[in-house]
Image: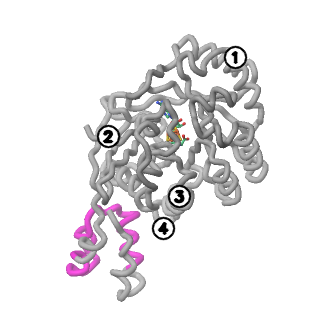
Amino acid sequence: MNIEKLAKVLEALPKYRVKQAKEAIFKNLIPDWNKASFLPLALRQELNEKCPLDIKAEALVSKNKDSVKARITLEDGLLIESVLMRHKDGRNTVCVSSQVGCPLGCGFCATGLAGFKRNLTPMEIVEQVIFFARYLKRGGKKVTNVTFMGMGEPFLNYDNVLKACRIINSKDKLGIGARNISISTAGIIEGIEKFAKEGTQINLAISLHAPNNELRSRLMPINKRYHLERVLDAVDSYIKKTKRQVMFEYLLIKDVNDTDANAKDLARIMRNPLYYVNLILYNPTMGNSFRPSTTERVKKFKEILKKNKIVFSQRFRFGQDIKAACGQFAGEKK
Ligand code: SAH
Ligand code: SF4
């Protein structure tokens, strides 16, 4: 899919044609200009040539059908992955990638281990949502939520990510509410500061994964540059300005960050009433020896948070069998 030349191709036509064409892409979700019967045949052919709408992707559906992974081949041949999660409550969340790979190299993350190739363009991000919007449309359903928790660090591709968000949010484009869009960052402070000034309802999430600098720096090398206290200061300024809740993602990795002491330290730094913790059971990936915490450990960890009145939830695990869970987006060819 590439609609960069759309304005140019439609330049000589009356304004309503441009509107119709955009509706065809974002509302009717056509995968081929030949489906745009309101346009003259010659124009449809020209559009198919210059602004192709097809998305080269391979879709993998999990056994219980609650998640679908799309492996998309970009124009330059690079691969990215996105996932659709079909929640029982009717929400259909698309988890999108913002970069091909990720330069931050967190040791527990399959994307980080695969290295970094390049940033995605705004439309390469939007295309991932369109892919699943088309998929769901066949069953009369819609994408309701978008999270930037696929491959890459969204705040290292700030402008393109925000441009993509505007297209995803815009009423005359995909029309997904800002409150239903979330951006997760490993803690890029400049990004958090800039995001605070956007005046948007888009949600902010922080990948925390450790309650102190020593451990966090070991798990997430970026912490050596942006220390925990500085990240939390930036989040506090964001909250002061926006009055919005912030989610802190905390992976539970066996014998790494799941001790009672870790839970107490976490409780101590999470006291802000607008913070809440999202616990994620570690998904084993290739290339490291990390394991998920035991059920018993998770229970104890949660008890400590509860005792300290920390607001938390535990993330449901989707699509283990198709490697569609958080941190399993490697983009590798089978
Ligand atoms: N780079 C951003 C957004 C993408 S990662 C960030 O790190 O926030 C999305 C989430 O998946 C992050 O919280 C990340 O830490 C988590 N994750 C990475 N590897 C994982 C794994 N193996 N199991 C579970 N979650 C993982
Ligand atoms: Fe990058 Fe996020 Fe993976 Fe870390 S967890 S390597 S920041 S994608």
Q: Which residue is more in the foreground, 110 or 184?
A: 110
Total numbered labels: 4
Taking the spot 48% from the left edge, 46% from the top edge, the residue there is 152
First-in-chain label (4 vs 2): 4
Q: Which residue is more in the foreground, 2 or 94?
A: 2
Span highlighted in magenta in the image:
18-45
Q: Quadrant of the C terminus?
A: top left
Q: Secondary structure at mark 1?
A: helix
Q: Quadrant of the N terminus?
A: bottom left
Taking the spot 35% from the left edge, 41% from the top edge, the residue there is 69
Q: Looking at numbered disc 2 in the image, what kind of residue is underneath it? A: Glu
Percent x, y of residue 179? 60, 50
Percent x, y of residue 161? 52, 57
Circle on res. 172: 4
Q: Which residue is mark 1?
A: 261
Circle on res. 332: 2
